[in-house]
């Protein structure tokens, strides 16, 4: 049996009693039921409402429209839905369709497409994607058996909804999303506001009348009328295109605040994230553990805050919104979320134990692998974060040279010796700050000055080998020569570049081998692991008083996962794949920038495999204003971006196409912002406001 269950209540906050408001003489709920009944597959329609007395008339109207009615728990909607299905005879393999009562324009053809796909592909869960207009395609399909499992296992606030258990467990439920060929996500036909209700009335009158005129038949023929009211998605879209004022009404546009309707939509879309953010702000500084994972780095209110799970290149937030992720856990994800091989290695190790009283054989295996792969590696010390690895390298360089001054270029983490040289230097002793000297990338004269000003005192040069658009020809070689000539050590901070741009990192790509290397981020596909690697005679100092030791350094899950990650990355074609995607992305983005004449406002910086759109301040607007417009629009279109485009092995050509389609819209708005010198009419959330600012930002 195939049962459609419609959830509806009288108690809408914004438009109380909307379910009984009349469209062409019939209550709204009657129309929802009428349209669902036009499905070729649906055999039974059930209204699932709450037990509150105000819903009684709603139940009566549903029955008049030919549906069964059920009243259940007000808040535990999952329980209400389950009991409604059970009461009307649903058995294990019976198919259930979830519909919401605020969609009087729901399209039976789309319901049928969902049901057919569900049956043909033998799926456990299918739903219409965001490319369908809101309120026209909204339906989800699953079996009663799956619903029962969700009913048994769902806990807490997730029970306020019916399907979180399905979208949070893609490993258990074979799922699919049906997308429309054309992206119609800008259209809204669900009814939350008075103006949207009026718009739906206009559509019914408009499309219904046309039919009547054609037939020239004034007779009230109930059966014919029912059919007349099932105009499909195409007809509805054509109608609002011809009647733009109706389109505005559907979006509930308040002319005094052009973005208000989107703000309202976002409150719904990110309801759980925003509620949890309130709590998190009280409990954890920046409501996150890493600055750049904080809500401050995303347009607050117009972006997710908390993520729930990931698979491949996609992530889902706690509200169930899906995104293609181009942030990659700040560069930690190299082969993709929930990669089966990495997860298998981790879960097998988990069965044996996480951390032990002595070393494991895995440490030796991974050290041997790194020595084979990384040109500068003769010995390895494992730590946990990038900051641990860069700080260990600096400690070793100071111990080896018996000098104290550090020359640095790039970002290296949160320890005193580095953050003391930035504007975020609170809590760092002055004596420590004095020892760190900055030099400019791709400017050998700038490094020479540091050496000349600190003759015989510089212990090491620590640098990100790739900054801006990468090293000028001969630059890294010149840095190495100058450093060694001055008796200092060269450290490459490959926390970002390691396992991302080349199997052997920047030193492999540019063929310049440093004395020491800091690795981190991508080496464990998200597991917490980093390492300092380098010459044996330097690493050996760890045995002679250069103290580098942590409880969790040899923790076995991350090491097992890292071995599996590197095994995958070592395969032929891995780096070719990410470079090819990167080239396609960069070329496509550059074309869009050129086409829109935005060359002066945004520049692409970095290597093809890992680059950032860098926005420039213009007129009254800051670089962050423009970045916010870009980021907000990308996120609105299902693409999670921060500043740089981080690719992993799981990204596909299709992901790149989707990024570019979203960027087309995002850059159009950037253009509008630049032309009008304002963003207040575009931004629907807060602005990107980093804690850590780079020199040229304002
Ligand atoms: N070096 C570089 C180049 C980095 O980008 C980072 C982190 N973004 C670090 C070091 C510090 O790594 P972690 O945050 O893991 O301590």
Image (cartoon, rainbow, N blue to C red):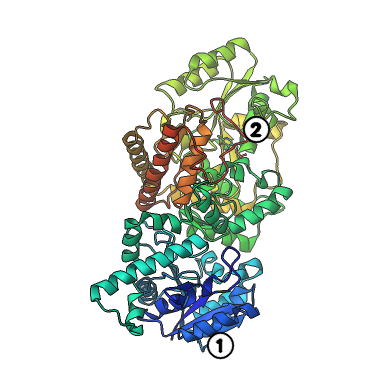
Q: Which of 290 and 461 is in front in this view?
A: 290
Foreground label between 2 and 1: 1
From where the camera sits, is residue 262 visible? yes
Graded by Cα atoms within 10 Å as few (under 14), some (14 to 19) or many (20 or more), the crowding at tag 1 reads few
Residue depicted at 73% across the width and 49% down the height: 282
Estimate the x, y position of residue 200 in percent, counting from the top left: 43, 66
Is the Cβ of the residue at disc 2 closer than 8 Å to that at disc 1? no
Estimate the x, y position of residue 562 in percent, counting from the top left: 54, 49
Q: How many labels does the image show?
A: 2
What is the secondary structure assignment of the residue under circle 2? Answer: helix
Is 639 on the left or on the right of 55, as rendered? left
In which quadrant of the rendered image does the N terminus lie? bottom left
Q: In which quarter of the image is residue 160?
A: bottom right
Estimate the x, y position of residue 431 in percent, counting from the top left: 74, 21
Q: Quadrant of residue 77?
A: bottom right
Using the image, determine if residue 577 lies above or below residue 43: above
Q: In which quarter of the image is residue 602?
A: top left
From where the camera sits, is residue 604 visible? no
Residue depicted at 32% across the width and 81% down the height: 224
Q: Which mark is residue 403?
A: none
Residue depicted at 38% across the width and 69% down the height: 204
């Amino acid at each position: 049996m195939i049962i459609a269950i419609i959830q509806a209540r009288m108690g809408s906050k914004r438009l109380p009693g909307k379910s009984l408001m009349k469209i062409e003489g019939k209550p709204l709920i009657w129309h929802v039921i009428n349209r669902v009944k036009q499905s070729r597959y649906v055999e039974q329609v059930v209204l699932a409402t709450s037990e509150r007395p105000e819903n009684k008339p709603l139940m009566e109207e549903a029955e008049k429209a030919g549906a069964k009615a059920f009243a259940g728990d007000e808040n535990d909607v999952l329980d209400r839905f389950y009991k409604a299905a059970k009461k009307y005879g649903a058995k294990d393999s019976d198919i259930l369709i979830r519909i919401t009562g605020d969609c009087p324009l729901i399209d039976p053809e789309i319901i049928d497409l969902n049901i057919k796909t569900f049956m043909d592909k033998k799926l456990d869960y299918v739903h219409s994607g965001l490319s369908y207009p809101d309120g026209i395609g909204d339906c989800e399909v699953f079996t009663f058996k799956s619903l029962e499992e969700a009913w048994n296992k769902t806990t807490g606030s997730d029970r306020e909804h019916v399907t979180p258990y399905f979208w949070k467990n893609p490993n258990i439920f074979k799922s699919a999303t049906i997308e429309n060929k054309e992206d119609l996500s800008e259209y809204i036909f669900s009814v939350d506001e008075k103006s949207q209700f009026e718009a739906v009335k206009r559509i019914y009158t408009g499309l219904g009348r046309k039919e009547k005129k054609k037939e020239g038949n004034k007779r009230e023929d109930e059966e014919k009328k029912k059919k007349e009211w099932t105009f499909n998605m195409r007809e509805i879209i054509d109608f609002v295109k011809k009647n733009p004022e109706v389109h505005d009404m559907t979006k509930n546009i308040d002319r005094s605040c052009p973005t208000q309707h989107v703000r309202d939509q976002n409150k719904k879309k990110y309801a759980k994230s925003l509620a949890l953010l309130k709590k998190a702000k009280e409990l954890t500084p920046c409501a996150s553990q890493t600055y750049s994972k904080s809500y401050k780095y995303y347009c607050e209110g117009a972006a997710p805050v908390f993520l729930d799970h990931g698979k491949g290149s996609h992530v889902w937030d706690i509200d169930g919104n899906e995104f293609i992720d181009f942030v990659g856990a700040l560069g930690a994800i190299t082969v993709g979320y929930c990669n089966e091989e990495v997860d298998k290695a981790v879960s097998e190790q988990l069965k044996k134990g996480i951390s032990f009283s002595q070393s494991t054989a895995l440490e030796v295996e991974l050290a041997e692998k790194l020595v084979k792969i990384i040109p500068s590696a003769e010995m390895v010390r494992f730590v946990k974060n990038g900051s641990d690895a860069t700080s260990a390298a600096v400690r070793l360089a100071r111990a080896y040279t018996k000098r104290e001054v550090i020359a640095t270029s790039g970002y290296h983490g949160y320890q005193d010796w580095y953050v003391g040289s930035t504007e975020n230097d609170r809590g760092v002793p002055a004596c420590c700050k004095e020892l760190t000297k900055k030099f400019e990338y791709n400017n050998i004269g700038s490094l020479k000055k540091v050496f000349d000003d600190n003759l015989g005192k510089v212990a090491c040069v620590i640098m990100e080998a790739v900054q801006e658009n990468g090293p000028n020809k001969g630059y890294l070689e010149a840095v190495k020569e100058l450093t060694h000539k001055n008796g200092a050590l060269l450290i490459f901070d490959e926390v970002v570049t390691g396992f991302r741009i080349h199997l052997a990192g920047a030193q492999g790509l540019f063929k310049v081998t440093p004395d020491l290397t800091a690795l981190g981020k991508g080496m464990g596909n998200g597991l917490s692991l980093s390492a300092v690697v380098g010459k044996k005679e330097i690493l050996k100092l760890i045995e002679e008083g250069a103290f580098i030791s942590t409880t969790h350094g040899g923790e076995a899950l991350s090491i097992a996962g890292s071995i599996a990650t590197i095994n995958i990355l070592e395969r032929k074609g891995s780096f070719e794949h990410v470079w090819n995607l990167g080239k396609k992305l960069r070329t496509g983005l550059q074309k869009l920038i050129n086409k829109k004449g935005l060359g002066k406002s945004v520049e692409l910086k970095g290597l093809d495999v890992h680059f950032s759109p860098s926005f420039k301040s213009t007129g009254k607007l800051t670089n962050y204003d423009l970045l916010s417009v870009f980021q907000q629009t990308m996120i609105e279109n299902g693409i999670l971006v921060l500043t740089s485009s981080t690719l992993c092995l799981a990204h596909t050509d299709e992901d790149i196409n989707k990024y570019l389609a979203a960027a087309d819209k995002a850059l159009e708005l950037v253009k509008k912002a630049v032309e009008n010198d304002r963003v207040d009419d575009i931004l629907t959330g807060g602005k990107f406001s980093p804690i850590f600012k780079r020199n040229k930002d304002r």
